[in-house]
Amino acid sequence: MADLRVEIGKLKLKNPVMTASGTFGYGEEFADLMDISRIGCIIVKGTTLHHREGNPYPRMAETPSGMLNAVGLQNKGAEYFAEHIYPRIKDVPTNFCVNVAGSSIDDYCRTAEIIGSLDKIPAIELNISCPNVKQGGMAFGVKAECAAEVVAAVRKHYAKTLIVKLSPNVTDITEIARAVEESGADAVSLINTLMGMAVDAETRRPLLSTVTGGLSGPAVKPVALRMVWQVAQVVKIPVVGLGGIMNARDAVEFLLAGASAVQIGTANFIDPTVTMKVIDGIADYLDRHAYQSVNDIIGALEV
């Protein structure tokens, strides 16, 4: 049996399979369906400093080969997570990572400090696709200097593994990746959702209350794969790949393109046990091709 262990910064994973934020709740929702401790790392839903109700309904829509969402980071805030949710998940024998979001640098820093105080949360994933209120609503992650600024600020307040989630809605994602690496990121994850929209022709109205939303699922996989490959060429820190991974074959493709780990997102809504199948499928691929370790195929794409 091949060795599936990988490292993301100081984060040691038993296998390279993670769950994408917003698609797996807090992990406990899936515990009756499978052994969630087998997952390399569970990334819980986006957490902000204060309670957020999220966007009005409807905020999800199915599309050909994907889905749109505009949930709007609905959560009860960082303090609530620390006091009520963390005690329920802290003893699950695997890694948990909290996706941290905010609309100002101070929000990010304060949330990171709260999560950083929790002993059994070894990492955060910084969502820099959030609107920067001081930049007129522009996302932090669409300009290199803004991305660098927020990452550098959080780095001063957070000592554990810092993964930065990159937005694909940019001209050159490698520029953003280099900027966050230089500012102290331990790893980058990509891609976040692509902006899209859907229209009901009969009612002449958009299907989402917010008109536009984030597109995920198989439709975005070629874009995600391309961006992961590009970023892996220019940074020295680990890359976590996500975007349309529906099975083990998809996951292996991302690993070959340079990802050190992968995240499963939309597929969880179709098959709640898909993470187990991806873990087993990667192991089977390694065995069939006589690889001793998953690290042997990371970045092994022959171009």
Image: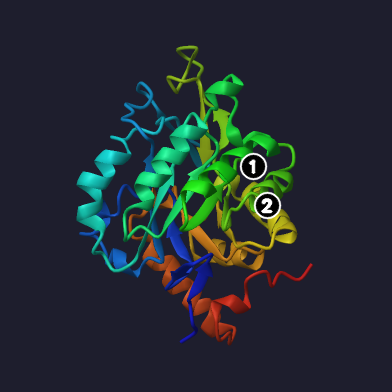
Looking at this view, is 103 or 289 the one in front? 103
Residue 45: quarter of image: top left
Quadrant position of the C terminus in the picture: bottom right
Task: Give the alpha-carbon distance from disc 1 to disc 2, as whole Å.
Answer: 8 Å
Residue on which the image places disc 1: 148
Instruction: Single out the residue that lies furthest toward the top.
Output: 204
Expressed as whole percent of the image width and height from the top left, the position of residue 7 reads 52, 70
Q: Residue furthest front?
A: 156
> Tag 1: residue type?
Ala
Q: What residue is disc 2 on?
A: 182
Residue 11 in the figure: left or right of residue 164: left
Label number found at residue 208: none
- Residue at x-position 67% and y-position 49%: 177
10 Å crowding of disc 1: few (<14), some (14-19), many (20+): many
User: What amino acid is at disc 2?
Assistant: Glu
Contact, CB < 8 Å: mark 1 with mark 2?
A: yes
| Mark 2, secondary structure of its residue | helix
Query: Total of numbered circles in the picture?
Result: 2
Q: Residue at 57% of width from left, 22% of height from top?
A: 134
Counting from the top left corner in percent of width and height, residue 150 is at 57, 39
Between residues 38 and 287, which one lies in front from this camera angle?
38
Question: What percent of the width, then of the height, locates residue 43?
Answer: 40, 53
**Side of 236 relative to 11 (left or right):** right
User: Residue visible at 31% across and 30% down?
Assistant: 51
Q: Residues within 10 Å of mark 2 (few under 14, many from 20)?
A: few
Circle nearer the N terminus (1, 2): 1
Q: Is residue 285 above or below residue 100?
A: below
The answer, for residue 217, to whether it is visible in the render is no
SS assignment at label 1: helix
Q: Can residue 34 be spotted in the picture? A: yes
